[in-house]
Image (cartoon, helix red, strand yellow):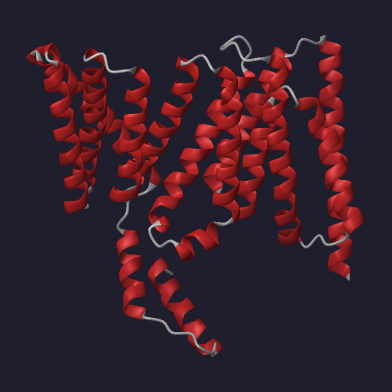
Amino acid sequence: MTNRENITAMLDQLKSAGIEGLVMDEEKIQAEYSKENNHHSMAIKVLSVFGGILASLTFIGFLFMAGLYDSSVALVITGALLLGLSVWLNKAFDTILIDTTSISAFLISLLLMAFGLTQMEVDFNLILIIFILLSLACLVWVQNYVYAFISIMVINGCLLTLIMSNETYDLIHVLILFLTVALLVIFQKEAYLITEYKKFITLYPPLRIGMVISLLTCLFMLSKGGLFPFQTQLVWFSSAVMITGILYTFESVFKAMGIEKTPQKNGIYGAAILLLAPTLLSPAITGSLLILLLSFRVNYKTGFAIGVISFIYALGQYYYDLHFTLLVKSILMLLSGLLFLALYFVTHKNLATDEKH
């Protein structure tokens, strides 16, 4: 059975249910499905991004040979024209070839304007703010998956660069707090956001994956000792934010799994706190677990896979980076594993008991 047939069967089932006040426009639903079905798979979107990057690098090489880089004003003007061209192409056409061309033009425009503004000796902070505003405008107006993803990465990359370039390294904890809260809202309020804000339907998938990658990037930078001069005594703050997010997410997971007993919930909360306490100096572990939990909650397979990979990497990093002996590390790993097993058996036993009742 095809997806179109599945939709028809679902509509017939809704009709036969006799739900009072339910009105459906079958033609519009099928038209929207056809439009959505014409959108390309994730693999093609990724390939189009890489194709756009390669084409951009080639074109930039050509511009370099043509001597465009001798004029900072020409760089900025050319970049602005290419930005306008890329937006127009994306709005006017909906094919993979045009998508790749518009993405290439978008990337080239950002690079050319960055080079030009730098040559004009514009304040670096102002350049970053300009790029944040441009990316926000493209994010809201263009309504395209790849555009939105690139814009999200540019915005968060500029915010992180602002922190690093001004040597206010510990403000990364504020950025992590913002990204975590935003991610919790995006995951937990998915239905509300899509229902209330129609434009959010298109922006939701790239916004979600972009925020996940941005958060993990910040957490791994923080967990990698010696990469930047972060104050070690403040690292626990980001870990505490992650742990709070995990405990907050537990409530919705409890509802999904049918766990209602207060003693059972308290037991899981207590076990989670004990389990996560040794990771206070490694927020990448708790951040990966938070993404795993959120992705499991909404059945987001891509996020779940990213969470698994990042968790394994963070665990290996934690094992090798700790300033403890191998014996202490092994004991911590053993205790964590035992707590995981205990948590599984307690949850499984209580769920089995609830199913019998």
Q: Nearer the viewer, residue 239 or 348?
A: 239
User: Which percent across, then down, holds residue 149?
Assistant: 39, 40
Looking at the image, the residue that sits furthest to the left is 66
Looking at the image, the residue that sits furthest to the right is 263
Image position of 139 (left or right of 67): right
Q: Residue at x 16, y 24 (%)?
A: 59
User: Which percent across, then down, holds residue 42?
Assistant: 39, 45
Q: Nearer the viewer, residue 311 or 66?
A: 66
What quarter of the picture does the C terminus occupy? bottom right
Q: Residue at x 33, y 31 (%)?
A: 131
Q: Residue at x 41, y 73 (%)?
A: 5
Image position of 139 (left or right of 304): left
Q: Nearer the viewer, residue 151 or 317?
A: 151
Image position of 165 (left or right of 150): right
User: Which percent across, then down, holds residue 178?
Assistant: 56, 37
Q: Is residue 2 visible?
A: no
Q: Quadrant of residue 292?
A: top right
